[in-house]
Image: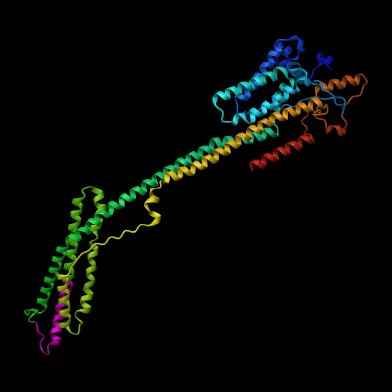
Amino acid sequence: MMADTGTRHSSAHRCVQTILPPVVHRFLFSQSEEFPVARPLFRALFGVATGTGNTSSDTPGRFISELQSAHVGNQRGYRREKTPQSCAHFGADQLFGGNRSAHRISLSLNNFIHFLFLGIAHNLPLTFDLKVAVGCLFVAVCLAGGLLSSSFRCSVLLVFPSMLGSRGRSYLILLALSVLYAGPVSNIQRNVEAAAVSVSCNLDLQVRHSKLLWREAIKPFLIITQELMDNKEGFELEALNVSKKFQDIRDEMVLQYGYDRFETKQGGGNSTQEEFTAKTLKQCDSVVAQGVQRCVDWFANRWTACLEAIPVPVINYILCISMKFHFLCDIMKVMTPWCRDNIPVEGNFGQLFDRLNVSVDLLSREFSAELTVEEEEQPALSEALLDQQFTNAVKTSFQKLTSTTGRVLNILQMLLSLTFITFFTQAFGYLWQYNRDICFDNVYITTYFRQIDARRRKAGKRCLLPLRKSEKNKLINPCSLKIYPEEVKQVVRSRAVTLAVFM
């Protein structure tokens, strides 16, 4: 097979020969003996680049076109050590060539180091010095593998095609989830946390200010009530004034007769009662009106005094608003119907007169004022609960949520590392089967295979082309637009998995 190297004219070979400069093409497709120094140096640089690339990126996101290995064999079922069957394989073999059997131990060691570093080392809480040491060790191992092991170099190259397979899609899904968690989800969480902390802070301020405002609001009421207690003598004087007013009413009702000299005339009960009733009815409205007016005047005086005591413009109106409740004085008007309904219709006006006189006298002698304040502390609004800062509670809750999100993100990062490891396992497995089984992935009808088949037909040897009908569904023509059954199964399976994830 190596004797035909100079006559190979596959599509890949012609494309590479057209694109690459002659020096590069000769370097890639020449024998190993032509460049005894450049080839080992290039292999070492390849190993260093591999180790550096894997070390500098925790979650590499390479998106490249899928590359299929094209190799065919003209003898089916024959198991042997495979030789390059295409331009790409030949160039890789010339560039990264070597004895595969001699490098199996090196390949296994490199694989183990790759798995250990990509799956575990990136997630360990290492210091900067340890990370540098581990990275240098990893680069050194990759350098040795790239220099000595062709299997290692081929496995690294095969990682790139596997990125667009099913494992690549899984990796992209995990990468998208990680980006969402680390970006928009975390941003939304931080914004919600900031908004919640702001609202809780405002709530704390409102509670504190409400307590202060309530204390300031009831302070005038307490002061006024205390003044009422302190002005007990003044209210007693007011009661005496009421008694004097009643005395005037009584004198007016009995005309020139005083209370002490008043005697009911014999036979004149009805006329006296009628006169007393008539004059009492006249005085009811007057007495009640005067009482209401005095009450209104008292509230007006207290309103003026309160405004003078609190000179702040808006706050004095809020705090002194209780002094505008002069409408409470109208409650005294309920005495008018009582006066009309009860006083004039008494059967014995003398008895009624004595009772009213005694009542007024008791009012003038036994008036007292006492303030009783009862404070009730509810458990739901206790000082202990109000002192518990809502902001701290919200922060604690969001710290738990942030911790949970961090754990989820760490799990996703670990899954990303493990998924990235599967790229290497798939590449190593492909290389292992490719080197041992000639039938493995040997289903492509390439240009080079057509040339070999044409030469065999001319020589009268056994050939494969043209394909039989049963073989057309098993062998794949890379230049054909036809979708083969095996490709349909893979496409349907991958689309089903993708739809299941996004739905």
Q: Which residues are magenta?
A: 262-286
Q: Position of residue 203 (x, y in %)?
A: 39, 47
Q: Please indicate whether residue 443 sits to the left or right of residue 393 in the image.
A: right
281 within the magenta span: yes
Could you say which is closer to the camera, residue 117 or residue 199? 117
Q: Position of residue 66 (x, y in %)?
A: 71, 28
Q: Please indicate whether residue 317 sits to the left or right of residue 441 in the image.
A: left
Q: Is residue 479 visible?
A: no
Where residue 496 sits, quadrant-wise, is top right
Q: Position of residue 277 (x, y in %)?
A: 16, 80
Where residue 201 sits, quadrant-wise, is top left
Could you say which is closer to the camera, residue 406 or residue 171? 406
**Looking at the image, what colour scheme do you see?**
rainbow
Q: Position of residue 65 (x, y in %)?
A: 69, 27
Chief SS of the magenta region: helix
Q: Is residue 285 visible?
A: yes
Where the N terminus falls, by quadrant?
Answer: top right
The residue lying furthest to the right in this view is 460
Where residue 478 sits, quadrant-wise, is top right
304 within the magenta span: no
Where the C terminus falls, by quadrant?
Answer: top right
Above or below residue 495? Residue 458 is: above
Above or below residue 501? Residue 60 is: above
Residue at 15% over, 76% down: 357
The residue lying furthest to the bottom in this view is 267
